[in-house]
Structure formats: C-alpha cells, structure tokens
Amino acid sequence: MFTVFLKFGENRTLAPQFMDAHKAWIKKGLDDGVFMMVGSLQPNMGGAILAHGVTRDQIDARVNEDPFVVEGIVSAEIMEISPTFADTRLEFMMA
C-alpha cells in the first residue's frame, strides 16, 4: 500500500491549464482500482492519494504520468506502508 503526497511546486500557477488532464489521470487510477482515496492536503498544499494493489515500480510509473508531475506543478513523495494491523473494514488491504 502506498501514500502519495503531491505537493505544489514552482509551476503551481500552471495548475488551471492542466487540471482537466490531472483529473482524467485521477479518474483512471480510481477506475483501475489502484487509487482508493484521493483528496486535498490542507491548507491548499496539494493532494494525497492512497493506492493499493501495485508494486513500487508500478506506482512510480503511474505517478510519473500525472500531468501535474510532468509539468512540475507538484512534486511527488511516495511512501510505502506494510500493514500489520487493520480494522476489519480494511482487512482487504492486508493482502
């Protein structure tokens, strides 16, 4: 499981120009079943993604396809989590 932090960078002002492509990238991640949750980092610092069911190489490749990453609008930090315990509602993530 991975948490991805997309923090605004130097080219933040370009965000509106690439927002539709970024949203399409998010939708694909959700449709593919890789992204489990996507949200904003507060206060207005960027975004965060909870991803599951892929390898480190696969999540790296997927994140590097985000138009916001490509254009330097955000920098990506990917943290891998090896779950040890989970609430019963999240047991599927233990695999």
Image: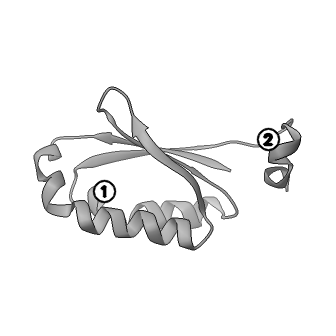
Residue drawn at point x = 47 percent, y = 72 percent: 28
Q: Which residue is labeled 1 in the image?
A: 69
Residue drawn at point x = 40 percent, y = 34 percent: 41
Q: Which residue is labeled 2 in the image?
A: 83
Residue drawn at point x = 22 percent, y = 52 percent: 72
Whichever of callouts 1 and 2 sits on the residue coming sooner in the sequence is: 1
Identify the element where label 2 is drawn.
loop
The crowd level at tag 1 (other Cα within 10 Å; few <14, some 14-19, many 20+) is some
Which kind of residue does numbered mark 2 sit on? Pro
Looking at the picture, how far across and down is residue 75, in whole percent? Answer: 33, 45
* 29 displayed left or right of 74: right
* Depth order, front residue of 81/40: 40
Placement of 36 over or under 90, stated as above or below: below
Numbered disc total: 2
Query: Residue 40, which numbered label?
Result: none
* 27 displayed left or right of 95: left
Q: In whole angstroms, how far apart are the C-alphas of marks 1 and 2?
A: 27 Å
Determine which quarter of the picture holds residue 18: bottom left
Determine which quarter of the picture holds residue 82: top right
The crowd level at tag 2 (other Cα within 10 Å; few <14, some 14-19, many 20+) is few
* 4 displayed left or right of 14: right
Looking at the picture, how far across and down is residue 40, in whole percent? Answer: 40, 40
Check the picture and name the quadrant holding the C terminus: bottom right
